[in-house]
Image (spheres, rainbow, N blue to C red):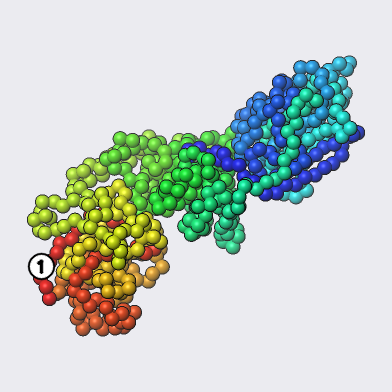
Amino acid sequence: MKSHVCWAVVALLAVLSVVSVSYAEVRITSARNDGSAAAEFLFENVPSPSRSDAAAQARFTVVDGRPDGNGGGVEKLSDGKVPTEEDQPAENFFFRAGTDGGRLLIDLGQAIEIQQVNTYSWHPGSRGPQVYDLYGSDGKADGFDSQPRKGTDPQTCGWKLIAKVDTRPEEGTGGGQYGVSVADSDGPLGAYRYLLLDVFRTEATDAFGNTFYSEIDVVDPTSPVVAAKPAVEPAGEVRREVVEIEGGKYQITIDTTEAPDLTQWAHDELAPVVKQWYPRIVAMLPSDGYEAPTRASITFSADMQGVAATSGTRVRCAARWFRGQLQNEAKGAIVHELVHVVQNYGRSRRNNPDATRTPGWLVEGICDYIRWFLYEPHSHGAEITSRNIDRARYDGSYRITGNFLNWLTETYDKDIVRKLNAAAREGRYSEDLWTEYTGKTVQELGDEWKAVMEARVAAEAAGPKPNTLSDQEKADGWKLLFNGENLDGWHNFKRKDIRPGWEVRNGVLVCADPHNAGDLCTDETYGWFELTLDYDISPGGNSGIMYHITDKGNAAWATGPEFQLEDNKQASDPVRCGWLYALYQPPIDPATGKPLDATKPVGQWNRIRLLITPERCVHEINGVQYFEYVLGSDDFNARVARSKFGRMPLFAKSNTGYIALQGDHGQVVFRNIKIRPIASAK
């Protein structure tokens, strides 16, 4: 989605608190939340950030050091706001990568008694912990220097050392959310007008170790102190499922606590997609030295508007939208967001101050290329048609840019998406890359792509309209079984209605949810006929066309032979597309040494022709004949007897019956379903 900021409030899963005593009676209380921290900076022992402390009216000045341009200004330190996610550079102040921190001056306007100085930071890696020395002064000492630079000991020019703060963990990078409270257990810290923070990076050898500071509060006796709050879980039953992938190498947490009605769907439908596709996305988008996140979360929020948004490794989803899309775009939308998790383009800006920014249209286009052309190409959701050809620009973003990228992979460089992703992640994207990879500018490529799309749309417009009959077809006795608008003329096997897994979308018949679809039968029965249709199927999908079905069997396949439909590349069923299930298969193709396969890959329409007459039955795919057989012949009956159907006394015994489309495994779409009844009878 366009926004990559997740506004979720996540429960505190781990709180580490440490208390140490510093100089004199000053006490430093440090608390840390791990990567599951909440946006409010809720700690058990450190007060929450205040919106009305003395620092809110103070003036912050950078005395020494170079602020990082990817962060916010010093005003972020006293705005009373804290980031809603750990990796939001613009909502934090931090010094530039490659420098050793700097010094910050806080001018309170006049000397006041200070009760506490509280500092807050948040980052997934080495920029989370806080390391600084805190000094105070009333500004009245002889030789007072209000802006001592690095290299000058503030204590030599009118400053008093209040505390030394170091919250680095003994092991690990220490990513997470930190709160530090500097206070005196017996009273105020002292009366100071000026405070000086001498900030250090967390690791001397880590050029990118300058902490992301989110807020600095100065609490005086008149400031309301927001009490520390214990970690809490959301009200009601917590519903989280951890999807373990590749033996636990990757763990994706799906949280439906705020949307318990989605829990079963998330377990049955979403978790398998996440388990299969997260490692695939990781493999699709590699770059040198990069390790994709091993932990991520998907949270369904009751009050979120829109669709979904990703920040770092956190995906937040609008439960309301997903409820209405469970059989349509829900799982694809999650795949899109998981691509954002793997992209991790903010990494380059965090680690390289000179990193270039990747345009948003390309970021989203890569996500939708993977979603629409690799995950669900059978849905044809990113096609350029007469409805959207006017908006077909290479930088149109989302599915339009996804279409452009798919065309590039087919026309110029099959690895171009991988290369562009690596450049974006490493902070070296530029328009020159398009010329380097293809020999043409992105503008030239965009013009060429659009010309191809316009020609394709024009050719389709000149051809027959889908789900219609030409005058010649009408004269030859053809009938439409599907009108492209509704499911008139169909019913589920042994039911009068149609189960919700079958839908009509944009002129195609969709088995959207095979778990709640069943076999869809024609209302009319047919004896001898010629049937044609177009189909496309999901990766690994399995379906079929059955004929001569009667209501006497317990299942449609108990009476009717099946023309198998399958994604031959990924499906697990050894019976391949176009075969008469368990009975007939095409001859060996000399070119491959395997049975003939004329199917087009997932994402392209395949044309089926099935001829059933007393004299012969023919299976064709894309104009290629696979085989012939004769129903009831000695050869046919012998094959039936040797198969599982030999135990089904009603199988292939009727010369008339319904035609059925099978709702089995995966999604399948149909259009142009036409039949020509043949009057002859055996």
Q: Residue at x 66, y 25 (%)?
A: 75
Work out whether residue 248 can be spotted: yes
Point out the image quarter for the C terminus: bottom left
Looking at the image, residue 575 lies above or below residue 392: below
Q: Residue at x 49, y 43 (%)?
A: 318
Q: Residue at x 18, y 48 (%)?
A: 464
Crowdedness of circle 1 by 10 Å Cα count: few (<14), some, many (20+)?
few
Extreme residue in the left direction: 475
Looking at the image, residue 31 lies above or below residue 629: above
All told, the count of numbered labels is: 1
* Callout 1: SS: loop
Measured from the top left, where is residue 161 in percent x and y? Answer: 86, 29
Q: Amino acid at mark 1?
A: Ala
Looking at the image, residue 323 lies above or below residue 72: below
* Residue 201 as seen in the image, left or right of residue 112: left
Work out whether residue 199 can be spotted: no
Measured from the top left, where is residue 521 in percent x and y? Answer: 27, 63
* Residue 300 as seen in the image, left or right of residue 162: left
Q: Residue at x 64, y 46 (%)?
A: 11
Q: Quadrant of residue 39?
A: top right
Q: Which residue is mark 1?
A: 679
In depth, the one of 442 and 220 nearer the eye is: 220
Measured from the top left, where is residue 204 in percent x and y? Answer: 75, 40
* Residue 110 as seen in the image, left or right of residue 526: right
In depth, the one of 595 and 77 nearer the eye is: 77
Extreme residue in the right direction: 24
Measured from the top left, where is residue 301 in percent x and y? Answer: 54, 44
